[in-house]
Image (spheres, rainbow, N blue to C red):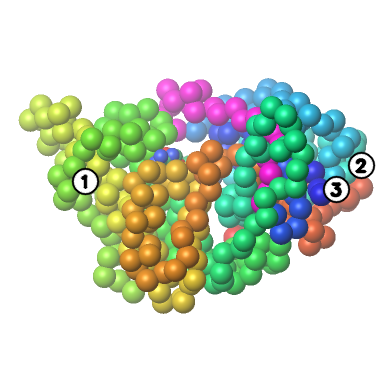
Amino acid sequence: MTLILGIETSCDECSASVIRYQAGSFIEVMGLATFSQTGIHRPYGGVVPEIASRNHLETVNPMIEEALREAEIRDRDIDAIAVTNRPGLAGALLVGVSSAKALAYALKKPLVAVHHLEGHAASIFIKRKLHDSTRTTERSAPATRSDPPLPLLLAIVSGGHTNLYVMKVLPELWPLDFLKRSLIGRSRDDAAGEAFDKTAKTLGFPYPGGVWIDKTAKTGNPNAFSLPRALPQKATYDFSFSGLKTAVALETAKLEKANLLESSLADLCASIQEAIVDALLSKIYLAARQHGCKSLAVVGGVAANSRLRKRLTSEWAAQGFLCEPLFPEREFCTDNAAMVAAAGAFRLIQGNAFRGDDLLTLNAIPNPEV
Ligand code: KG4
Ligand code: ZN
């Protein structure tokens, strides 16, 4: 059994987590503390990098202390520390990386550098610990994992990425460059989360708008407005969402002029959501069929979207796939340190850790090649 402390500060979430890892089992979250800066950035309509890093400086230690406290362990009982060191905002990454280095050096523990997207990929293997008053459940062995059949189509849909990967190996064997090797499609402009956030901003919702569109769409008609789906007929697994953004801006202006925006809001949100979900699903189905994928995992902030989860759950089998689509539990879709610790566990057992003076060489890489 390995205990890992994970630290995530790549963007506007400051998060620390303690997880328990055992080969062949689900990753069990023992403690997780996250401070979301969304309220701080809201007046600016997006993340302000300088404000993000200054805020991480204030919150990173309290988050680490809180995660350890919830896990009921002391820092010296940790087996390794994992930190997101790429990609992300330079100053924001540096706060997490510096804290992780200082802790690992002082405690003489191995340090694992994690790619943020590997963290998202690992999130499907995470389970919350069972809060049981007798505490016996917490101490029992983590639930056995039954791995999805390979190849697995992995869709990372977040605020920064909309990427499709064909994964031919299980997580413990992920080679260092698997993200580069297995990428088959990506967004040519905005990411799916950005499409949600930018169209939501046009409609007057606060940042980040994805969750507001999701909520407001619940009472709307997804076919009320005809909005563009980019690259539908093309033999590509790439996405494009910039046309949708423009179409929504034009439609909103028209409705505002006619004083109909308020009364059409639910319909417009449902139509926007449907356009994004349609675009994601059509490429997911195409890629899964053409690459002979036997399973599917959808991860990242947009994987929390209720319409995407509902449609995939009901349509995937009808598309001829036998295995249920996999989603992370909702709280592990958006950025969190449990996923970083989980990916760190997979790296650690492959021997990809820095130790001793070597760990002082670890750096933040805002724009890695992959
Ligand atoms: O993975 P994440 O926390 O950060 C990045 O790595 O980018 O994803 C954040 C994105 C935001 O664009 C947010 O609007 C979107 O995920 N998001 C949602 C929902 N919850 C979060 N989009 C649609 N529906 C949701 N329920
Ligand atoms: Zn993310």
In the image, is 308 to the left or to the right of 96? left
Amino acid type of disc 1?
Pro
Which image quarter has ligand 2? top right
User: Which residue in the structure is indicated by mark 3?
Assistant: 110
Q: Residues within 10 Å of mark 1 (few under 14, many from 20)?
A: some
**Residue 69 placement: quadrant:** top right
Q: Residue at x 38, y 38 (%)?
A: 210
Q: Is residue 28 magenta?
A: yes
Q: Residue at x 81, y 48 (%)?
A: 2
Amino acid type of disc 2?
Lys
**Between residues 65 and 160, which one lies in front from this camera angle?**
65
Q: Which residues are magenta?
A: 26-46
SS category of the residue bearing label 1: loop
Q: Is residue 322 visible?
A: yes
User: Which residue in the structure is indicated by mark 1?
Assistant: 222
Q: Is residue 26 shown above or below 215?
A: below
User: Which residue in the structure is indicated by mark 2?
Assistant: 108
Foreground tag (2 vs 1): 1
